[in-house]
Amino acid sequence: MRGFTTPTDRIILAAFVLSVVLVGALIAVPVLHAVQLSFYQAQSFVSERQFVGLANYTRVLADPLFWKAFALGLGFAVVAMGLQLVLGIGFAMLLNRPFPGRALVRGAAVLPYLLPTVVIAVTAHWLLDGAFGLFTLWAQQMGFGRPAWYDHPVSAALLVIIASVWTWTPFVTITFLAGLQTIPSSLYEAARVDGAGAWMRFWHVTLPMLKPVLLVVVLLRSIWMFNKFDIVWLLTKGGPLGATEHLPVLSYRKAFNQFDVGGGAAVATLSFLVLSVMIAIYFWRFPLDDKAAS
């Protein structure tokens, strides 16, 4: 309690410790419960359970659908995160330049990030519905017939990626914009004196200075995209024919549609373990501490 001499300071410290404990419990309890369920066979969360040990894991790992869902989730995370990075850095550099109405444009750029996912999904359905969707009607008027946006595996996967990129690129843009504003202008002036063009200034000044931000954004966006459930479920429900069924959707289907709670918990636990390993490798390969990296 050194440094916390007044009653007010001690109350603030106690409130902080209590909040940390509560947040930790809200995270740890569901995770531990899911891990526990993965060792049992049950048809619902309230039905009688039968301990089966590692049988759920053996069954899940032997299922080709698990590996297909894993590959889809990995591809979805890589493509969506890559597009968000490219667009986010580009928009951030544009918004960092002075132009009339910049503050208004910056505020408008945040709007997709503020919208609830269900609003985005409903809007996408309204635009792409096969019978009365606005884009469908436009395509028909231009002589392309009625595109079945949700019926083809490639187009369904692209819709999920486009919706995710549209929703989360503003977060990446804001993050990089904040990083750009911390770069001293003297570095760019020195690069211009040395004869560096726009691309060389970006490659040798902007990117190195944004490296800490870039590492954090890549980590966060990869985790969130790999685990993203709501936008996929609301748009395609994992279809058509499992073309967009990644691990979160597979876990949900097993637990709530196939009444295989143990199998769904095993898929969720394996997904958690895979992410944990990936995060550990990422921190080992790209340490956030510059001293450790050197």
Image (tube, rainbow, N blue to C red):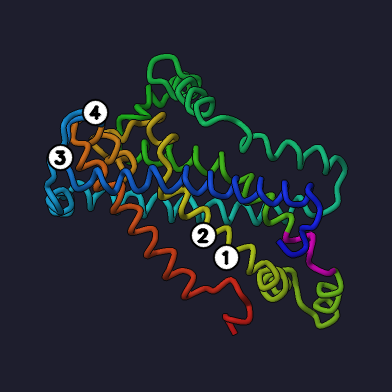
Camera-side residue of 12 and 208: 12
Based on the picture, tell me whether residue 143 belongs to the magenta stretch.
no
Q: Amino acid at mark 1?
A: Leu
Tell which circle, 3 or 1, labels the residue nearer the N-terminal end.
Answer: 3
Are the residues tagged 1 and 2 within 8 Å (C-beta)?
yes
Are the residues tagged 4 and 2 within 8 Å (C-beta)?
no
Tell which circle, 4 or 3, labels the residue nearer the N-terminal end.
Answer: 3
Camera-side residue of 172 and 52: 52
Tell which circle, 3 or 2, labels the residue nearer the N-terminal end.
Answer: 3
The N terminus, quarter of image: bottom right
Crowding around mark 4 (Cα neighbors within 10 Å: few <14, some 14 to 19, many 20+) is few
CA gap between label 1 and label 4 equals 42 Å
Q: Secondary structure at mark 3?
A: strand
Q: Which residue is mark 3?
A: 41
- Residue under the point 60% across and 63% down: 214
Crowding around mark 2 (Cα neighbors within 10 Å: few <14, some 14 to 19, many 20+) is some
Q: Which residue is mark 2?
A: 219
Q: Which residue is mark 1?
A: 215
Camera-side residue of 175 and 276: 276
Q: Amino acid at mark 4?
A: Val
Q: Which residue is mark 4?
A: 46
| Secondary structure that dominates the magenta span | loop
- Residue under the point 62% across and 35% down: 112
Q: Secondary structure at mark 1?
A: helix
Q: Amino acid at mark 3?
A: Gln
